[in-house]
Image: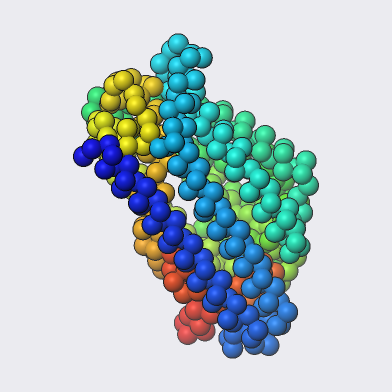
Amino acid sequence: MSAQLFTFIFIATLALTTLAKLWLARRHLAYIAAHRNSVPEAFAGQISLASHQKGADYTSAKTRFSMLSVLFDAALLLAFTVAGGIEKISELSHDWFSQQLVQGMATIVIALLLSSILEAPFNIYSTFAIEGRFGFNHMTFRLYLMDALKNLLVGAILGLPLLAGVLWLMGRMGEHWWLYVWGVWVLFNLLILFIYPAFIAPLFNKFSPLADETTRARIEALLKRCGFTSSGLFVMDGSKRSAHGNAYFTGFGKTKRIVFFDTLLEHLNTEEIEAVLAHELGHFKHRHVMKRIASTFAISLVFLWLLGLLMQTSWFYQGLGVHPSTFGSSDPGQAALALLLFFMIMPLLSFLLGPVMSAYSRKHEFEADSYAVKQTNSRDLVNALVKLYQDNAATLTPDPLYSKFYDSHPPASVRIAHLKAV
């Protein structure tokens, strides 16, 4: 394949993907607008028209803003690739550093930092304008900056040694380097799952033992019935950043813990909290977390194998605006270029996987719901979900096709109907 042909394929794929995302967003907006003035029958009497319209307006505001992000991301990708951005960053890294491994690391770090800085205004507007307008943002700008600094430090402490190891393996392990890198990637992710609850999460939030004795006793009885052991039940101060509520499992092995947002506990009664937790336990019982981790690892192995093929070709680099003196993985600097280019275009490769992964996730949600109603009263879970939809201003009427592409959970009406039918 020639470099010119690959450039054409890349630009055409980017254009088609961008247009598809914008088209899906417009469908979503139109569908929400068409159903804005009437509460779906399944929620009549439980959610007011005003709450329904707030959810429609909130979702529409986020969707419109996402369309700007889609256009910006496409422009940024073009600037980094065919317009020569990565080529220029690589040249600067070679001018500033003499050691090849350091050059490669610098190229990737500079590109990622530059991308984060350019995308920061979008994150700031989303947090302080959109979330603030609808009453969800509790974050101060100082806290936003502190979070950004902490994320940067944690990313550097954990990410830089990983990056150095990956580039070293790419340069030293021959044509099958991708197998070694994949092994390191798997071990790294398992390590993060193990250390996140105790060492990383507390850097950002305060976690307190669940104090309500009635709720604790009921939850512990549920855990015993389901055969689940954890290192504790915790309440997270999510309200210092957002009014949104949630609950989740985190950790791996003996570090597993159950975490409730304080905002969730404020709006649900004990029975509803138990039902929400039973749903999460359904994921545990059906081994959904392990299945998702395994599928993610399998996909990453395929992508690394594909990168191993692409980086041996001149047209892959040149077609994306980079002109290294050699091709392959023996030079850590060239390996870094290949890695950076590939992961920048990977969203184009994975876009069509979206509906497949979303369908897989929704299947798991139905299974978890079915398990929950066997352990608790289905009416409690329905009531909890209705409250969560209302409190989080989630639209009750998403466009069906848009939902198939993006939503990891079934649409509200579909999910409630499934619960009532179980």
Residue 265 or residue 221, whichever sits in front: 265
- One can see residue 105 in this view: no
Where on the picture, by quarter, is residue 321? top left
Residue at 73 percent of width and 79 percent of height:
50
Count of labels shown? 0
On screen, residue 97 versus residue 58, left or right, reads left
Q: Point out residue 175 in the picture as x, y percentages from the top left corner.
A: 23, 28
Residue at 57 percent of width and 55 percent of height:
68
Extreme-top residue of the structure: 98
Position of 73 relative to 406 (above/below): above
Residue 388 or residue 170, whichever sits in front: 170
Residue 60 or residue 205, whichever sits in front: 60
Where on the picture, by quarter, is residue 198? top right
Residue at 44 percent of width and 24 percent of height:
90
Q: Point out residue 6 in the picture as x, y percentages from the top left corner.
A: 29, 42
On screen, residue 197 versus residue 406, left or right, reads right
Position of 32 relative to 257 (above/below): below
Where on the picture, by quarter, is residue 103? top left
Position of 131 relative to 417 (above/below): above
Q: Point out residue 81 in the picture as x, y percentages from the top left corner.
A: 42, 37
- One can see residue 61 in this view: yes
Residue at 35 percent of width and 52 percent of height:
13
Rendered-image quadrant of the N terminus:
top left
Position of 234 relative to 24 (above/below): above
Q: Point out residue 205 in the picture as x, y percentages from the top left corner.
A: 70, 45
On screen, residue 323 versus residue 254, left or right, reads left
